Image (tube, grey):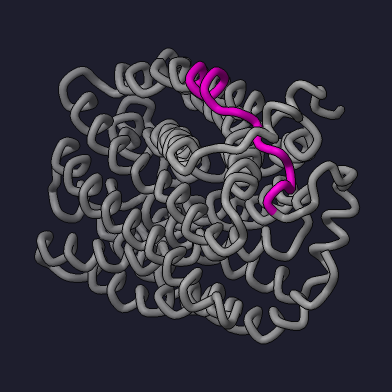
Amino acid sequence: MNESPSAQQSSATPVSPAYRRYVLVLLTLVYALNFIDRQILVILQESIKADMDLSDSQLGLLTGFAFAIFYVSVGIPIARWADVGNRRNIVSLAIAVWSGMTALSGLTQNFWQLLLARIGVGVGEAGGSPPSHSIISDYYPAEQRGSALSFYSTGVYLGILFGFLIGGWINSQFGWRAAFFVVGVPGFLVALLVRFTIREPLRGGLDGRAHETPATFGATLSKLKSFGSFRLFAIGAGLNAFSSYGIGNFMPSFLIRSHDFTSMQVGTSLALITGIGGALGTYFGGVLADRFGADDKRWYLWIAAIPGACSVPLMLSAVFVGDPRLALAFLFFATMLGAFYLGPTIAISHTMVSPSMRAMASAILFFILNFIGLGLGPLVVGMLSDFLAPSYGSESLRYALGIVAFVNLVSATFFILAARKLLDDLRQPL
């Protein structure tokens, strides 16, 4: 399926820097909305757990694996569609689907109904990032993609910020069901904005590869498999996400159980601490990677590795310190350093492949990242907490989070090993 001649002609029209920034900001808003709808369950989970009598393992399944398995599997065919079709329309449709399923979550009456609704959210959100990554890479030249994709990736933490703020307040005032409706419905308006204000860019136009034949899934997968560095840094990204999702998804429960926070206190604290800290780390990770990586591309992976490793002692302090104010301070810096990896990882993936492979490359990277991170991270934390409960009681979650914090050291090791192979891989023809 190819774009129509009129679409190609429109997309080839030169764009102003202001319009290019508008597209980046709007797609970042889309990503923030994606994460509001994805993570709203996290701030509501203690109320849902009490209402539906759920275990920590079930919470880990709802916030992680059940969502992730459909998110990553559906993402592959959608990315193939994005590499040959109109990416703007795909993003718009995806927003409408995940927003509707989020609102529907407020009507669920038991675990299985909520599980199905979360699966629906995952299916919709699979159409968000790969097409958006590809659009951004066709609006920004290679030397600016790390910064642009990192700016886009701040949507993760902006979504967490507003999701926690809105979710915590609405949950305390009106209950968890109302929160799903409030964050779900506005998505339909954003879907219309994307559909009618974003112009589909010329695929590969900034790389001198416009109108090349779209690559198949098999060709893209074969290309990525030929890179020893890709396999290593994709696992490194997945392990970093394992730690961040595993800890982040259970941090509200930890603060409530171990520090006696209310739902509103959790929402306000984590919105500011995690949202702002994560957004700063994500953005500056890309900026620093573009700056230092201009002379040596290995900096894209070193920028992912070094701050991630430095986040481990800070996260351990956040989990085990007794003073909640100190815990939040340590959490801010741990989250900031742990977030450096995302933009540089996406950017270097796009540098390694041709323009017609970018959406699929993002989907394959996110398949690995989210299967390991979102799929297994919260589930493992929940299972560890349940396993440790007979020995540590209500403090079992504290020790589960402390164990998982060490995974970022393993993640950093994979990034360092990938950097050793990167320059040879980049010498391969696109």
In the rendered image, residue 40, in percent from the top left (x then y), is placed at 37, 34
Q: In which quarter of the view is residue 130 placed?
A: top right
In the rendered image, residue 226, in percent from the top left (x then y), is placed at 84, 70
Is residue 66 shown left or right of residue 59? Answer: right
Q: Which quarter shows the C terminus?
A: bottom right
Extreme bottom residue here?
420
Q: Vertically, is 41 above or below 56?
A: above
Q: Which quarter shows the N terminus?
A: top right
In the rendered image, residue 343, in percent from the top left (x then y), is placed at 51, 59
Question: Which contiguous range is marked in magenta?
Answer: 191-206
At 53% from the left and 59% from the top, the residue drawn is 144
Is residue 7 shown left or right of residue 392? Answer: right
Please tell me whether residue 196 belongs to the stretch shown in magenta.
Answer: yes
Look at the image and tell me whether residue 113 can be seen.
no
Q: Vertically, is 76 above or below 319?
A: above
Is residue 180 shown left or right of residue 139? Answer: left
Q: Nearer the viewer, residue 108 or 202?
A: 202
At 47% from the left and 35% from the top, the residue drawn is 19
In the rendered image, residue 321, in percent from the top left (x then y), is placed at 17, 70
Q: Nearer the viewer, residue 262 or 49?
A: 262
Please tell me whether residue 414 belongs to the stretch shown in magenta.
Answer: no
